[in-house]
Image (cartoon, rainbow, N blue to C red):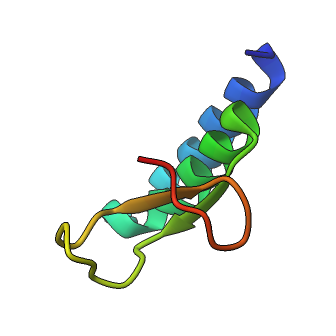
């Protein structure tokens, strides 16, 4: 995993944290981007409920193929 992807993620998290207003969901876009960069998959933050419950993230190979 390239170090610059992790550095970008940490920088983004630090910027949100410094505001003093960030809660869990404020950090998710940065994590979504990091997951996508690392895996090359299409990552969806807070997808709709499915038969498996309400996941925080959904990982897809393409536009509609879910990774199990």
Image quadrant containing the N terminus:
top right
Q: Is residue 50 above or below residue 65?
A: below
What residue is at 27 percent from the left and 78 percent from the top? Answer: 50
Left or right, 10 with respect to 48, comes to right
Whether residue 19 is visible here, answered yes or no, is no
Name the image quarter holding residue 14: top right
Whether residue 47 is visible here, answered yes or no, is yes
What residue is at 38 percent from the left and 68 percent from the top? Answer: 25
Q: Position of residue 35 (x, y in %)?
A: 60, 42
Left or right, 13 with respect to 21, comes to right
Tell which residue pokes out farthest to the bottom in this image.
48
The residue lying toward the viewer, choosing from 68 and 18, is 68
Left or right, 34 with respect to 25, comes to right
Left or right, 24 with respect to 68, comes to left
Name the image quarter holding residue 63: bottom right
Q: Position of residue 55 (x, y in %)?
A: 28, 64
The residue lying toward the viewer, choosing from 35 and 41, is 41
What residue is at 65 percent from the left and 38 percent from the top? Answer: 9
The residue lying toward the viewer, choosing from 36 and 51, is 51
* Tag count: 0
Q: Position of residue 56 (x, y in %)?
A: 33, 62
What residue is at 36 percent from the left and 84 percent from the top? Answer: 48
Q: Position of residue 65 (x, y in %)?
A: 60, 64
């Amino acid at each position: 995993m390239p170090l610059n992807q992790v550095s970008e993620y940490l920088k983004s998290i630090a910027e949100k944290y410094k505001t003093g207003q960030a809660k869990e969901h404020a950090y998710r876009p940065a994590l979504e981007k990091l997951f996508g960069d690392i895996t090359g998959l299409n990552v969806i933050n807070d997808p709709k409920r499915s038969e498996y419950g309400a996941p925080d993230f959904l990982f897809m190979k393409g536009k509609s193929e879910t990774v199990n």
